[in-house]
Amino acid sequence: MNWVLKRCFAGAMMLAIGATFVPVTGFVTPSYASEIKYIVNGVPVTTYDIQRRAAFLKLQRRKGNLAKEAADEMIDQTLRAAEIKRLNIKVTDDQVAASYKRFAEGNKMTTKQLDGIMTQSGVTPSHFKQYIRSQMAWGQALSARGRGGGGGGRMTEQEMVRKMMEKGGGKPSATEYMLQRIIFVVPPKERAATLAKRKREAEAMRARFNGCNSTREFAKGLIDVTVLDVGRVLAPALPSDWADSIKATKTGGATPVRETDKGIEFIGVCRAREVSDDRVAQMLFQKEGESGGGEGTDELSKKYTAELRAKAKIVNN
């Protein structure tokens, strides 16, 4: 997933759908009744689908009108699914399972434990896997669109490797980071009164940071401090607002603290190593294509989805 799945994991699911900043907490499984809420180009979107997506957004600690956000996401996902089918893009069950496993391992869980979290939260493993499949396939659709076609052909990882190597040199490498995210949570209504104090607390903890193994021990005596194991992230997939500071930080160190919408944060660099594989080549080739075209993936996705919505027949039941 990309760096969210960057919204899932943003923020996916930082999902293999790359890597993720997804806090895992306990929930009680709700009971759901289901009825058709929308019909999108003849395809039903049920209240059960929307409730599961809302539970997913809650698991990410998203704020706002989650029911509306969940409905919009499920409509978009349904539109994208039809486009993915038109382009003849296929993501296998094995690819989804591998991505699901990587996400679990990145959060120091077994797949069985992740199954439990998804079930208890009301998301369910099947909904999360459906989301992973959609994100992976949509990424391929964006790649095809970015190459100027919008047609059905898509470039495989091996083809991207060949393209990179045609430009000279061997298979490219990139730094793979194992990261930890430390958040000193500041609720919106308390920002004016407590932000400066929380920043001092975060600076003090950062000064004591000496590797990811002891972070939770340091955080035990602190109030409203969240420690998240982000997992493995390749350098090209680092979020733009953190990338420079992460790259400038040595293994075992921490980035400078900064203010975010969650409060005050810093990132611990648990490990960094050079890796070389087809996935690196694919990411670098895609990134090169994005910079050359002047349109990033997020903007392209928004534009593409807006076009699908404009042509769609969406009935609200």
Image (tube, grey):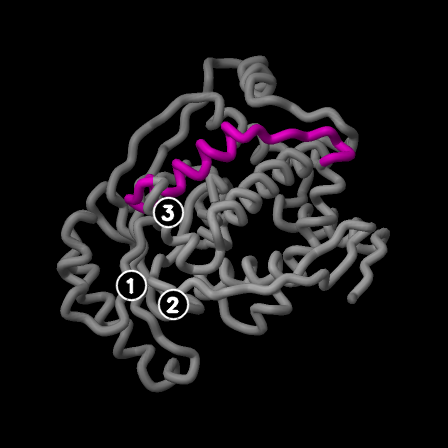
- Identify which amino acid the numbered label 1 is placed on: Thr
Local packing at callout 3 (Cα closer than 10 Å; few below 14, some 14-19, many 20+) is many
Reading the image, the residue beneath label 1 is 226
Q: CA distance from mark 1 to mark 3?
A: 19 Å
- Identify which amino acid the numbered label 2 is placed on: Glu
Task: Determine the residue positioned at 25% across, 52% down.
Answer: 254
Comparing 38 with 158, the one in front is 38
* Vertical arrangement, residue 84 with respect to residue 43, above or below: above
Reading the image, the residue beneath label 3 is 114
The secondary structure type at the circle numbered 3 is helix
Query: Is 62 placed left or right of 245 in the picture?
Result: right
What residue span does the magenta drawing correspond to?
Answer: 85-110
The secondary structure type at the circle numbered 1 is strand
> Predominant secondary structure in magenta?
helix
Q: Is residue 105 magenta?
A: yes
Query: Is 270 placed left or right of 275 in the picture?
Result: left
Q: How many marks?
A: 3
Task: Determine the residue positioned at 24% across, 67% down.
Answer: 202
- Identify which amino acid the numbered label 3 is placed on: Leu
* Vertical arrangement, residue 76 with respect to residue 161, above or below: below
Residue 259 image label: 2
Q: CA distance from mark 2 to mark 3?
A: 30 Å
- Image quadrant of residue 208? bottom left
Mark 1 or 3, nearer chain start: 3
The secondary structure type at the circle numbered 2 is strand
